[in-house]
Amino acid sequence: MKKVLTGNFAAAYGATAAKVNVVAAYPITPQTTIVEILSEIVADGHLKADFIKVESEHSALAACIGAQAAGARTYTATSAQGLALMHELIHWAARGRLPIVLTNVNRAMGPGWSIWADTTDSISERDTGWMQVYCENNQEVFDTILMSYKIAENEDILLPQLVNLDAFFLSHTSQVVDMYDQKTIDSFLPPYKPTIKLDVENPRSFGALTSPEHYYEFSYKIAMAHEKAKQVIADTGREFKKIFGREYGMTESYRCDDAEYILVTYGTIAGTAKDAVDRMREKGIKVGAFKIRYFRPFPVEDVVAGLSHAKKIGVIDRAVSYGHGGAFFTESKAAMYGHDIPMYGFIAGLGGRDVSIEDISGMVGHMQHQDPENMIWIGVKK
Amino acid sequence: MIEIRFHGRGGQGSVKASDILAMAAFKEGKEVQSFPFFGVERRGAPVTAFTRISDDEIRIHCYIYEPDVLVILDPSLIGAVPLTEGLKPNGKIIINTVKDPRDFTFDDAENPQVFTVDCSTIALEYGLGTASAPIVNTAILGAVAKATGLVGIDSITEAIKEKIPVKKEANAEAAAKTFEQLRG
């Protein structure tokens, strides 16, 4: 069934279609309407789940951690400062190996106070052990939530996943979304059946004191799960295509085969970049767009395979790591070590600044005529 | 792909109009996208909203800088904000006004096709809003359908009934009336 939905509705309907058992959320700004929609769906009886309204985002994730450890499939959503307030428990969820799915609407961190698109909030959670995926459109939001549970709950992975979408450019933008048939979704994503959970009949200890003798191995196992996740993500994407007709990998190439210039992007800018590529191709410029969906695990192999034939590479970040550059840029550059291809780091769209086709074409113009730099700011008012 | 930019004032329903137009085109099998200018809305302040309609997947995710169609819900915005900026040559401008299309000239647009219709009076006839603040968002969509041919009036009235929670019939009939009364 197709409907015209905002990104917030696509996320809420995705969680509903995934038949989550527990939703815990704090409903105040910077929260979006995602949990408000879910509260109505639960109240109307269309989703048989416990909706736990809590007093902060920190508690929202704490509630999800408890419920997930007890064997429930859990969901929460937040943004910006809300995600930051969860930070301590974001580590907890990953180290506790709890496959929670969290939708983060990417909003800028304050002050200056902002509710607009910027991915600094999620990039700041890079080293917590969560998998991170960035969506280009509302269909991808719906589809990604379904796939996220399947990937996160895989016995070889058991890690939480952050599903990111740009504030307003997806969250408040309506697009056509195919929500499929619930029976088909159920066969793709059966109920969550953990082999280890909190159970009074079979008591276990979760999150106990861990001496230097064991902590190192716990960390090693999380790192190895991220490595395995690359294959699980690819396999899940292929299975999804077989059933629903849309394929998702860790990355996506657009007109890159013969491209001399490749622009690496993520989120909604990836969509605009495809239109920009078409326009530049009409003018004879050999340019392609390369979308990175997964930031963690970082798709090093796909990035190398997809970019190593380019003459010049530009990376557009909607966030900045102060003192060095955009994270997608620095990670892509590290992945391309040894390839000797000039790489340009563009900082764009912070705090909801619009990134137009003209802006993106300007970046390619910059790559054609200027020397590479780590931080190239687009249209700064001086 | 056709790009439509709505200009109104907070309280007139410009954002809802962009959604209903998208919904109507979706009913005819099109790919659509609709969204507001992302800001903090205040009653009476200028509001901008956007609709994209296409036969193919819509991938672009930025504001509309070169619209094919402008829909002006409040004529007092003319001269107050740069409405026609970026309008494509031969682009269409639909204005809610008692005036005639010939009364308008837009020096910065290339050969625009101007259409007018008195949505405010029609909205009040159907009890939509008050004399000081008529709600014209549904009414003007009939005129948009007629002027552009992008969607049929039946799709517009169906979409209105789906998206508007109260006075569904009155809103739909107001749109049907502007469809008939469009000038230009």
Image (cartoon, rainbow, N blue to C red):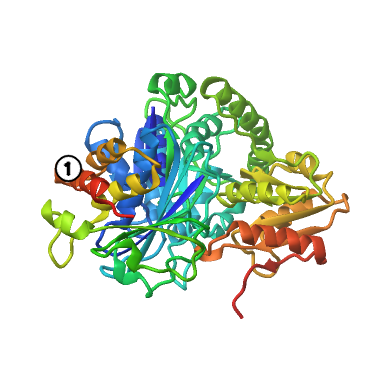
Residue A144, relative to residue A322: is it above or below? above
Q: Which residue is mark 1?
A: B168
Residue B134, relative to residue B164: is it above or below? below
Question: Viewer-proximal residue, A84 or B113?
Answer: B113
| Quarter occupied by the C terminus of chain A | bottom right
Q: Chain of mark 1?
A: B
Question: Viewer-proximal residue, A227 or A382?
Answer: A382
Could you tell me which residue is drawn at 22 percent across and 38 percent down? A43
Instruction: Give residue B47's quadrant in the image.
Output: bottom left
Instruction: Give residue B23's quadrant in the image.
Output: top left
Could you tell me which residue is drawn at 18 percent across and 43 percent down? B173
User: Where's residue A40, x and y in %?
Assistant: 25, 41
Could you tell me which residue is drawn at 48 percent across and 53 percent down? B68
Left or right of B144 on screen, residue A112: right
Instruction: Give residue A291's quadrant in the image.
Output: top right
Left or right of A69 on screen, residue A24: left
Does the rendering let one see residue A66? no
User: Where's residue A143, x and y in %?
Assistant: 49, 34
User: Where's residue A212, x and y in %?
Assistant: 66, 48
User: Where's residue A191, x and y in %?
Assistant: 42, 24
Q: Three-letter amino acid code at disc 1?
A: Lys
Question: Viewer-proximal residue, B71 or A256?
Answer: B71
Left or right of B80 on screen, residue A235: right
Left or right of A90 on screen, residue B155: left
Does the rendering let one see residue A183? yes
Question: Viewer-proximal residue, A108 or A271?
Answer: A271
Q: Label 1's element?
A: helix
